[in-house]
């Protein structure tokens, strides 16, 4: 797999009256599993969209390195798979039709497609539902289909925006098993989530609030440093602290 | 400051355009509402308007007041009675001729004054007059033009044998009876396909923005040109089917003659639809909201097609500004092409200007839609 690393340096982005990103710096190395954790409105989606080139930073820069050499966004883009937070699949198209659509968009050859489709269907356990339209899938299945579409190409990086939002606990665990398996293959994964318990599953977490990352590091280290039992407690304490001021 | 550099090759790949097209066809095949709008509405409108919009005035109630009561005066009255255009009425007891006009029992009155035959025999000008109810000026002008027609063969003999020499001869080519239905239905092609096609594509890109699928699409390598082509193609096919249905309705339902070449007609339809479908896409790309796109497409599709295309009001009689403005409207050129092909049998060379202008407008609109296609989510 082609190695890809992403460096976000001091990025500012204003959306309307809101300063969505207020100086975000983030270093994402190949093969890492990164979590951006924060309450709603912290700027997680804006950060992911900025990395994906869907927003242009007002200040600061997003840089890419392919095989340790500086690369342009257009060179890096085909290596990045992205799964948006909002429902972005076509409700009337079935799982099979979605996969075929993305196969053609990514210009994947038939043999590669057949092999990859088999594997993804097995991993996601969606084989039985191939003909079901996306609009009739459960929340978890829908998210898995989104992930399948993103993984149909062989990405070097995977950006997931709240992929487990609205998904039942069992499906969430399955989803995480899938992510671990992908990480084993060396894919760089960056996921944004508002679920604090998911933070502990990441290799490195970046805690975000009001457009800034206020702390980052391996989950255990952060909890020990902040003397918190878990991330939920940490965020609640922080929120109360800021109200108290 | 960093905007991502755009150095990687941005090639147009047919496979990707095709995948967009295939997806659109799948959407369409499941969307009965859109399908019926695209295919049913045009045919319905053509049949509906074809029957309702009939400028021909037939069986005008003509009150004949023959005060001469001679063979010659009866001959004159019979001329009017024998044509399908007038239904002769006689004066009722106690009714005045003008009273019958006021009541609306008659639309026109033919007065033949006493001494009509005598004056005519002497070669003097003889008096017969027609009074027309001017309240409905559309009908009035039609009746007046019929009267002009009565001076020409086959009725002209009456006048020629006698006193007046017709000073004006008018012969109508291509549509000798000036059958307005031929005129209306060939014009309807423009209005109907124009309105429906703009609306069809106006919703497609806006829908992707509203449902959120655009965000996913933008994160794939697909290029704006591929999206535009992929979205144009299926709707072009659908609209051509609709044109085929309208053609069938026009030929079978209204007996409109087709004197031209079907290839030329297809080319004209293709060019016109490229303009209108691209216009819809441009609206969709710019508004990114279905509601707004729908209003814009109604405004920019319906109004020019009905009012400025020459379908209802002749372009020649418009003020200079509007006349020049219509040159920018594909609908105006398609009206010219349609009527030319159907009624005059015009070929590609005869229609070089309308076809050429539509090709240019279509290309510019496609180019603009691609150019204005947003590749990011910036507001």
Image (cartoon, rainbow, N blue to C red):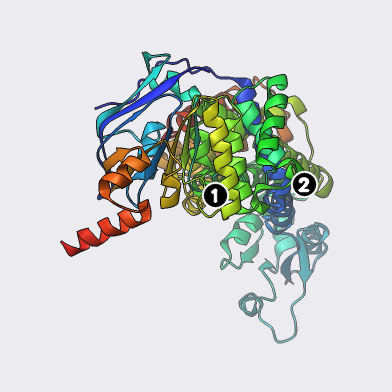
Q: Where does the image place residue B85, in percent across and percent down from the top left?
A: 76, 58
- Quick one: SS at disc 2? helix
Task: Tell which of B307 and B135 is nearer to you.
Answer: B307
| Image coords of residue B68 (percent x, y) | 74, 69
Q: Residue at x 31, y 59 (%)?
A: A236
In the rendered image, residues at marks 2 and 1 fall on the same chain:
yes
Q: Residue at x 25, y 62 (%)?
A: A240
Left or right of A9, for residue B368 = right
Q: Residue B161 has which mark?
A: 2
The x, y position of residue B38, in whole percent, is 68, 47
Question: Subunit of mark 2?
Answer: B
Q: On screen, B103 above or below A107?
A: below
Residue B302's tag is 1
* Image position of B98 (left or right of A163): right
Q: Which of the 4 quarters of the picture holds residue B228? A: top right
State the residue at coordinates (71%, 25%). A115
Q: In the image shown, does B321 or A164 lie closer to the viewer? A: A164
């Amino acid at each position: 797999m082609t190695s890809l690393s992403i460096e976000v340096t001091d990025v500012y982005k204003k959306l309307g009256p809101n300063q969505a990103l207020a100086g975000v710096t983030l270093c994402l190395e190949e093969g890492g599993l990164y979590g951006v954790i924060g309450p709603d409105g912290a700027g997680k989606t804006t950060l992911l969209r900025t990395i994906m080139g869907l927003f242009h930073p007002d200040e600061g820069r997003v840089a890419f390195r392919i095989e340790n050499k500086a690369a342009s966004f257009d060179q890096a883009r085909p290596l990045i798979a992205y799964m948006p937070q909002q429902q972005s699949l076509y409700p009337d198209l079935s799982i099979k039709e979605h996969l075929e659509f993305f196969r053609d968009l990514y210009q994947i050859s038939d043999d590669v497609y057949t092999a990859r489709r088999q594997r993804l269907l097995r991993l996601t356990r969606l084989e039985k539902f191939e003909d079901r339209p996306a609009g009739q899938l459960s929340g978890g299945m829908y998210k898995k289909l989104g992930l399948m579409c993103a993984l149909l190409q062989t990405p070097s990086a995977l950006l997931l925006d709240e992929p487990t939002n609205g998904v039942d606990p069992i499906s969430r665990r399955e989803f995480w098993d899938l992510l671990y398996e992908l990480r084993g293959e060396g894919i760089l994964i960056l996921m944004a989530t508002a679920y604090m318990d998911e933070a502990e599953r990441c290799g490195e977490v970046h805690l975000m609030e009001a457009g800034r990352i206020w702390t980052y590091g391996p989950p255990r280290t952060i909890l020990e440093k902040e003397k918190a039992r878990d991330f939920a407690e940490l965020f609640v304490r922080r929120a109360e602290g800021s109200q108290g001021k | 400051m960093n905007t991502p550099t755009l150095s990687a090759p941005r090639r147009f790949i047919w496979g990707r355009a095709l995948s967009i097209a295939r997806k659109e066809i799948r959407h369409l095949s499941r969307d009965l509402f859109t399908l019926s709008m695209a295919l049913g509405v045009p045919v319905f409108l053509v049949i509906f308007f074809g029957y309702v919009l009939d400028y021909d005035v037939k069986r005008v109630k003509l009150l004949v007041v023959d005060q001469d009561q001679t063979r010659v005066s009866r001959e004159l009255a019979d001329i009017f009675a024998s044509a399908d255009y007038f239904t002769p009425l006689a004066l009722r007891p106690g009714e005045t001729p003008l009273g019958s006009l006021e009541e609306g029992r008659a639309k026109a009155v033919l007065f033949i004054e006493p001494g009509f035959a005598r004056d005519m025999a002497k070669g003097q000008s003889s008096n017969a007059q027609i009074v027309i109810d001017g309240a409905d000026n559309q009908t009035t002008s039609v009746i007046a033009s019929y009267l002009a027609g009565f001076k020409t063969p086959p009725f002209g003999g009456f006048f020629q044998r006698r006193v007046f020499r017709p000073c004006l001869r008018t012969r109508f080519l291509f549509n000798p009876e000036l059958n307005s239905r031929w005129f209306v239905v060939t014009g309807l092609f423009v209005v109907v396909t124009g309105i429906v096609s703009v609306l069809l594509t106006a919703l497609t890109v806006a829908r992707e923005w509203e449902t959120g699928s655009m965000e996913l699409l933008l994160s794939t390598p697909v290029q704006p040109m591929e999206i535009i082509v992929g979205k144009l193609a299926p709707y072009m096919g659908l609209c051509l089917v609709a044109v085929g249905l309208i053609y069938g309705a026009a030929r079978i339902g209204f007996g409109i003659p087709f004197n031209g070449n079907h290839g030329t007609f297809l080319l004209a339809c293709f060019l016109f639809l490229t303009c209108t479908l691209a216009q819809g896409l441009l609206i969709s790309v710019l508004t990114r909201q279905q509601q707004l796109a729908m209003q814009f497409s109604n405004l920019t599709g319906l109004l020019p097609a009905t009012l400025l295309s020459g379908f209802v009001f002749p372009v020649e009689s418009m003020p200079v500004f509007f006349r020049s403005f219509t040159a920018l409207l594909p609908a105006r050129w398609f009206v010219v092409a349609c009527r030319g092909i159907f009624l005059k049998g015009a070929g590609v060379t005869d229609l070089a200007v309308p076809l050429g202008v539509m090709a240019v407008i279509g290309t510019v609109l496609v180019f603009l839609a691609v150019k204005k296609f947003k590749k990011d989510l910036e507001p």
